[in-house]
Amino acid sequence: MLSLPTARNKVIANAGFLAAILVHNLTYPLSAAGNVWPALFYGFYATIFVVATWALSDGRPLRVLVGSAGLAVLIAGLLNSYVPSNAAALAVYLTSIVYHLGMVVVLARYTFGAKTVMTDILISATSLYLVIGSGFAAVLALIEWYAPGSFVASSGAVINWQQMVYFSYVTLTTLGYGDITPVGFYAQSFVAFEAIGGTLYAVMLLSRLVGLHASKS
């Protein structure tokens, strides 16, 4: 499917991607489950952004960027799962950051470039919020990789990137359970930036939607 000319197809494409993101966010612990589960998880993870980009964007550069990043994420993820090393972990974080940046651009252009408020725009905006949260997880994991001990768990457990997904969403929503604490300078600065960005996103999106509705009226 290279284009989505009808409003119904746009809703279906956005709803399908949102469902895929939710499945990804519920199944990421499988990446550490062993056996065939990491392969299934990374195969799914490396596919969903690529399919969504081809469905929601006609830009060839974005399609190439996200597609290439998806392939790189798959290779890095499999290496880190079955032949773990510091280099493989770094590759997962870096490729995931690029992968998420490409998807953020696709969804931001789709959401904020709209002229009218439609169901597909609301779904796309929700997906964008979730993608930002999982993208920050890779950034925070990279910080921990670069400066071990930047994040401390109250239980004393070792923090890996799977915990960063949870912590990122807790930060993005400004919920703050306090079970994981950023103690390094880079960790604190990026966590503060994410919390502020999550709040501003809601404000900007609401203002945009109200403005579009008012102009249509």
Image (cartoon, rainbow, N blue to C red):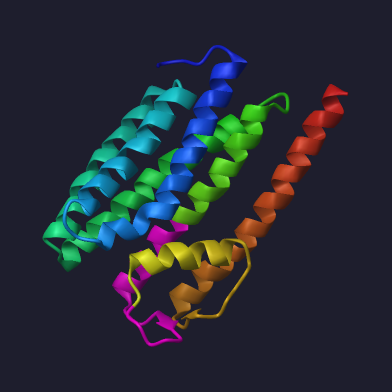
Q: In which quarter of the image is residue 124?
A: top right
Give the side of residue 169 with respect to residue 34, left or right: right
| Above or below: residue 14 compared with residue 93 | above
Q: Quadrant of residue 148?
A: bottom left
Magenta stretch, residue numbers:
135-158
Q: Is residue 53 visible?
A: yes
Give the side of residue 130 with respect to residue 113, left or right: left
| Above or below: residue 37 compared with residue 55 | below
Q: How many callouts does the rendering have?
A: 0
- Asked if residue 209 lies in the magenta stretch, the reply is no
Give the side of residue 9 with respect to residue 49, left or right: right
Q: Split into 4 quadrants, where in the image is the C terminus?
A: top right
- Asked if residue 136 lies in the magenta stretch, the reply is yes
Residue 102: image location, x then y, percent: 42, 40
Residue 73: image location, x then y, percent: 26, 47
Observer-nearest residue: 161 or 101?
Answer: 161
Residue at the extreme left: 83
Residue in the image at 36% along x and 44% along y = 99
Q: Split into 4 quadrants, where in the image is the N terminus?
A: top left
Residue in the image at 44% along x and 24% along y = 55
Residue at the extreme top: 5
| Above or below: residue 155 compared with residue 159 | below
Give the side of residue 152 with respect to residue 112, left or right: left
Residue in the image at 52% along x and 72% along y = 189
Residue in the image at 84% along x and 26% along y = 215
Q: Is residue 105 visible?
A: no
Residue 58: image location, x then y, percent: 45, 20
